[in-house]
Each structure stands twice: as C-alpha cells, then as structure tokens.
Amino acid sequence: MTTADEGAGLRERKKRMTRQALRAAAVRLFTERGPACVTVEEICAEAGVSPRTFFNYFDSKEETLLPFTRDTREEVAGRVRARPPEEEPQEAVRAVVEESIARTVAGETWSQESALLRSNPQLLQRGMVAARTLNLALRDGLGERTGRGAEDPYVRLVAAVSVTAVHVAVNVWQGAVEERDMSQVLAEAFDGIERGLAPPQEA
Amino acid sequence: MTTADEGAGLRERKKRMTRQALRAAAVRLFTERGPACVTVEEICAEAGVSPRTFFNYFDSKEETLLPFTRDTREEVAGRVRARPPEEEPQEAVRAVVEESIARTVAGETWSQESALLRSNPQLLQRGMVAARTLNLALRDGLGERTGRGAEDPYVRLVAAVSVTAVHVAVNVWQGAVEERDMSQVLAEAFDGIERGLAPPQEA
DNA sequence: AGCTAAATGTGCAGAGTTGCAAAAATGCAG
DNA sequence: CTGCATTTTTGCAACTCTGCACATTTAGCT
C-alpha cells in the first residue's frame, strides 16, 4: 500500500482514485463491447459517481484512454523548462514529448489500451482533442524557457508542430499493417519536421 | 443572374442555396448577439429548413464560418495535383494552402467574418475541427501526386504540418494586438517549418 | 471537537449531435 | 404525363456535454 498513492491529503488521493476508477471502468467496458456501445452513464455506474462528475474529469469518454489529461499540464511544462539550457527549443520539446510517449508505451496498461486504439479509429479522432492540453503545456514551458512568452508566434509554432508530430505518429502507428513501435514512428515524424519536410531519401 | 449558380441541375443549385442560406443566417445572428447566444434551431428557422437538415450540411454551427467544408475536398486535392510537377511536395501544398487562404481573405464577406472570429476565440477552437477536411484533401492530392498514396507517413506528415501552419497562423492572427495580414502570418509559419523549426533570427 | 472557507460531487435543464427510418423532392425513362 | 429510382429532408429518440445552483466533503485553524 505504501506505493505512489501517498502524495498529499485525502482530497488528492480521492481525486486520483476516482479518475482511476473511471478510466478502468471505461477501458473494461470499451474492450467488452466496443466504445460505441458504452454510455457515459454506464461507466459512471461502474465507477460509482454521477454522470455529471465524469465531465469534471474528462471532456469526453474517449479521453479516458489518453495520457495527456488536464492535470499533466504543469508537469509537462516543468519538464520543458528543466531540459538542459544548451538545447534548442525544438530539441527540448522533442525530448519531452518523446519521453512522455515512451513512458505511456511502457505503462502496464498500454497493451490493452493500444489494442483498443488500434481497432477503433474513431477513438483517436475524437480523443486526440485532448492533445490540446499537450499544446498548452508545451507553450507554457517553452514560453518561459525562451523568455518569449506563451503567445509568441515561434513558441506557438514549435508547440503546435510538435503536437502534430504526435498526431501523425499515432495515426501512422494505428494504420500500419504490422505492429510498429510507436516511439520509432514518432522519431521519424520529428526527423521529417527537422528536415523542413523535405522528402525522405529511401535506401 | 447568369453568375456561378448555373452549374448542373436543380438539385445541386438548391443544395448550394440552402448552404448559403444557412451560412448567411448564421453570420447574421452571430454578429447580432454573439455565437453563444444563437441556437441551431434559430439559424434553421431563418434559413427555412429543419434543424436536422443543418447537420446534413455542417458538423457544427461554428463550421458555417470557415471556408474548408466537406465539398471542397476534391477541389483542393485537385489543385495539389495540378501544381507544376517540378515543385517539391511541401512547396506544392504550401502554394495551395496559401492560395486558399488568400482567396478567403479576399472574399467580400471576410471583413464581417474576420471581425467575428477575432472577437470570439471559442469559434476558432471548435470550428477548426473543420480543418480536418483540409487535411484529408491535402493527403488525397499529395498521395496521388507523389504516388505514395494518402496513407503514406511522409504524405501524412506534410499534410498535417501544413494544416498546423494554418492553425498557428489563425491563432497568431487572432491574438495579435494590431490587426495583421493573415497571409503574411501564414507565410511566416511556413517559413518556420521549412527552417525545421530553427529559431528565427531577429533583426 | 467545532467552525469556516474552499474544493468537490450532484441534479437539473437546455443545447448540440447523430443514427435511423419514413416522407418529400427530384431526375429520368417510357 | 406517369411511374420508378435516387437523393434530400425531416421527425424522433438517444446520447453527449455544459452552465448553474445546491449539497457534501475536506483542510486548516482554534
């Protein structure tokens, strides 16, 4: 019991538990009958909260599957600030993003989640709106890191394009016939971006 | 009357008229009381169609304001294919996107629309989902143009990042204190992308 | 323990959005 | 002009999602 659910007071712990319960219920039901045949109401019944509460935690049922939730914003921003100062902005952002994805893929629930995501394309389309959180987080971090502020056009561009890299990687990964390593797909997307979108030279 | 509303049969013409009526009603009502205080039902009442029909034309009320609708997909794809063959993929895409935006900005309704967009940030966030259409169109066009197909990772990347350029441009444009020329903001975004996101050198 | 302020959970009402199947409009023979 | 196939519109029902007001819980203090 003395694991990671120790931080702070009862309030925080309860919130985390509720979030986890909702996530777990969603994953279970989604796997069982497919996302389209599960209502928010059912997820809530299983997690023991009211439907209204569900939307205090997630913007949509699809979002329960994805890693970038509202509360990860400051954490990600902090990681961007904490990168070695000699790194260029896009290097720092890339590192943080790749790290986040790697962590997600390494998680113990990933195999079940990834199966769901791979077989239900709609999930991604709707759920990836959650990537907006990632965008904001990167802008926060980069804005401070560069001293340009989160509204700066260059900051916006680097953040948005990096999020797009994730989008593309996820979609390519999902569409691939053979199962590929998501981290590698993501790296290729970033490489393409750093080439300024020049065509890749095939071997 | 012998303008552009001549194409094809009655069916097509009516569809275009309905679309226009919905768009016009939306713009008028949005301007009058702000987007949040206008319901789809009201728009439909003014356009003389049932609420259900509205969603046969648009995916959301915000979309009525934006240029990339479902029916522009083939047209945009065609323009990508029609670019001079010596152009690199991202050059061709950039040209088409910049052209589209320029055309929108030059339209006679732009001043009213841009005022709406500038003063209602939520409109963009919700409405830019419509940019998905642009993404698909670019992928279609590039997929054929390069012979890689619309699913190819490189094709996906170029399309997605180009759409992101539009996103960033629109947001920068909207957030700018002094009113800027959208085409120029967009060009700067593309420049940044072609630099591989290297930091801009200030004068 | 008891009080208060802040955070969290809940119910409700209303708007947005979608699938489905029936109804109306249109295009096209004959 | 009439009948038939196709497209478009519509009504309906169910679900998603949001704002608001109110109840409940927790944190911090005494």
Image (cartoon, coloured by chain):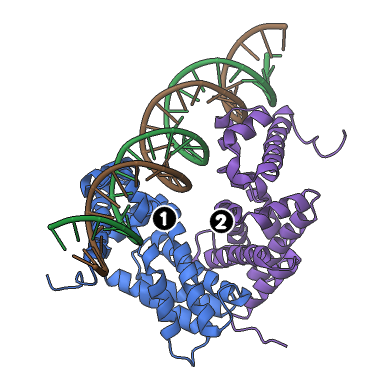
Chain colours: A purple, B blue, C brown, D green
Image quadrant in which you'd find residue A43: top right
Query: In the image shown, does A148 or A151 lie closer to the viewer?
Result: A151
Mark pair 2, 1: CA separation = 15 Å
Identify the chain of the residue marked 1, using the numbered disc in the image: B
Query: In the image shown, does A117 or B186 lie closer to the viewer?
Result: A117
Image quadrant in which you'd find residue A166: bottom right
Looking at the image, which residue is at 70% across and 45% down? A31
Q: Which amino acid does label 2 sit on?
A: Gln
The image shows residue B22 at horizontal and vertical percentages of 27, 53
Looking at the image, which residue is at 39% across and 52% down? B123
Image quadrant in which you'd find residue A165: bottom right
Q: What residue type is labelled 1?
A: Gly
Q: In this view, does A145 lie to the left or right of C25?
A: right
Query: In the image shown, does D15 or A168 lie closer to the viewer?
Result: D15
Q: In this view, does B79 lie above or below A48?
A: below
Q: Mark 2 points at which residue?
A: A125
Label 1: state its secondary structure. helix
- Mark 2, Cα crowd under 10 Å, few <14 / some 14-19 / many 20+, is few
The image shows residue B1 at horizontal and vertical percentages of 11, 70
Q: Name the residue under label 1.
A: B127
The image shows residue B189 at horizontal and vertical percentages of 48, 73
Label 2: state its secondary structure. helix
